[in-house]
Amino acid sequence: MQNIPSKAFAMPFTNPAFPPGPYKFVNREFLIITYRTDMERLRKVVPAPLEVVEPLVSYEFIRMPDSTGFGDYTESGQVIPVMYDGKPGSYTHSMYLDDHPPIAGGRELWGFPKKLATPTLAPHSDTLVGTLDYGPVRIAIGTMGYKHRELDLAEQGARLAGPNYLLKIVPHVDGSARVCELVRYHLQDIRMKGAWTGPAALHLVPHALAPVADLPVLEIVEARHLIADLTLGLGEVVHDYLAR
């Protein structure tokens, strides 16, 4: 008789959608545009015990050309600065990407809120351009002047290394929540290769199933273009919503 639990780490059991970690990324490239939005809308989407202290959202386009087990893919979505237990961190609100293994692995391991879509990130002449298409509809366009001014690598590495939070939900076979947890993880072994800023713009379009525009852009606060090697660390549960 097979010892199922000894080999069970992902589905399908005999041919998992992703391999065991660690998950290392080489030349991971970010365009992060931080903007001011509506505070009440933020509070409605950020789960307690996380706290929102400023009406800010970071919209991210991320190119991952070389990642262990996940391959070559691109990701885009919204990350919200939060406080937990009196310390600053980031809550991942939405992520859209074009590759099945990191969708399956991200959702099953950590609880990343990932959906299938088509993001891009690439330089075009003097502009770094990020886009996100959900089906035939373009719902996000981010642009930044290409490498206008260098940023301090140590400072940007420290920002990437901060705590990140996710709401992990796994349903029971009856449709109720079997797992409902607040998860914390860190990016590790960060080796910064470049960091720049420049003028930036962000345009978000309403969509029924990819509602990035529900957190509207009121003012651009900051833009960063980063390149780094790093490891995506596994997580820990910091709050169990189903615990009695």
Image (cartoon, rainbow, N blue to C red):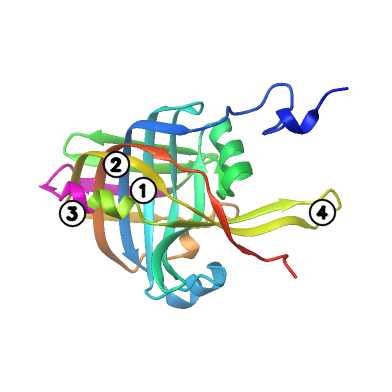
Residue 29 point in image, percent of width and height: 31, 38
Q: In the rendering, which numbered label is found on residue 175?
A: 4
Asked if one can make out residue 222 in the rendered structure from this viewpoint, the answer is yes
The residue under label 3 is 199
The range drawn in magenta is: 140-155
Residue 150 point in image, percent of width and height: 12, 47
Relative to 83, say whether 125 is above or below.
above
Asked if residue 144 is among those painted magenta in the image, a careful observer would answer yes
Q: At 27% across and 53% down in the image, what residue appears?
A: 158
Q: In the rendering, which numbered label is found on residue 141?
A: 1
Q: At 37% across and 58% down in the image, what residue appears?
A: 58
Which residue type carries mark 3? Answer: Pro
Asked if one can make out residue 12 in the rendered structure from this viewpoint, the answer is no
Which residue type carries mark 1? Answer: Ile
Residue 65 point in image, percent of width and height: 38, 28
Mark 3 residue crowding within 10 angstroms, few (<14) / some (14–19) / many (20+): some
Kind of element beneath mark 1: strand
Task: Nearest to the eye among marks 3 and 4: give it.
Answer: 4
